[in-house]
Amino acid sequence: MVSDWMAVALGGAIGALLRFYVSETVSSEGFPWATLTVNLVGSLLLGVMTAAVAASTLSETQALLLGTGILGAFTTLSTFSIETATLYDEEQWSALLGYIASSALGGPLLALVGWRVGNSVLFPLT
């Protein structure tokens, strides 16, 4: 059986590779699209995963692999913070406000959508 530590390590490696792939394939000239993409997609998927955990569809080890490992390494608050500071430093005010608003509102909203879709469609509680 895979230990929880190994599940997180394996998931972290997968999530980091996926994030690197997105950063290499999504153009971020003028706006941090790659980071916004991983953070919004990660929020949606974590919402779905939370519904799966609540419905007892995932074991604790699977939740650690997917949530803490893959999605934890896939999403990034630190890069969001640096990119926000960079937009501020470069006085790109509209991009700065758009980035902060879309991240701060979009992330939680997509997490809620994922959770609700997970609860009602994918893993309805009986």
Image (cartoon, helix red, strand yellow):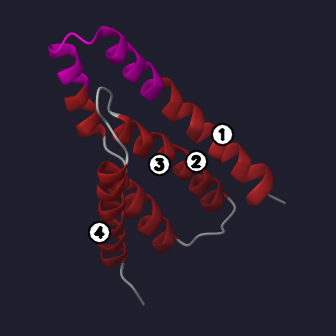
Q: Which callout, 4 or 2, points at the residue further toward the start of the chain?
A: 4
Work out how far the residue at label 1 is from the one at label 3, CA to CA, in angstroms. Answer: 12 Å
Tag 4 or tag 3, which sits nearer the N-term? Answer: 4
Residue under pointer 2:
47
Residue at x-position 32% and y-position 56%: 73
Q: Residue at x 23, y 38 (%)?
A: 78
Q: Quadrant of the N terminus?
A: bottom left
Instruction: Determine which residue is flagged by label 1.
Output: 113
Q: Disc 3 versus disc 4: distance between alpha carbons?
A: 15 Å
Q: Which mark is residue 13?
A: 4
Query: What secondary structure characterizes most of the magenta part?
Result: helix
Question: Residue 97 in magenta?
Answer: yes
Type of the residue with mark 3? Gly
Q: Are marks 1 and 2 in contact (CB under 8 Å)?
A: yes
> Dot 2: few (<14), some (14–19), or many (≥20) neighbours within 10 Å?
many
Name the residue tied to disc 3: 42
Q: Residues within 10 Å of mark 1 (few under 14, many from 20)?
A: some
Q: Which residues are magenta?
A: 84-104
Between 32 and 78, which is closer to the camera in this rendering?
A: 32
Near mark 3 (Cα within 10 A), the count class, few <14, some 14-19 or many ≥20, is: many
Residue closest to the eye, 109 or 84: 84
Give the residue type that dot 1 points to. Answer: Val
Amino acid under disc 4: Ala
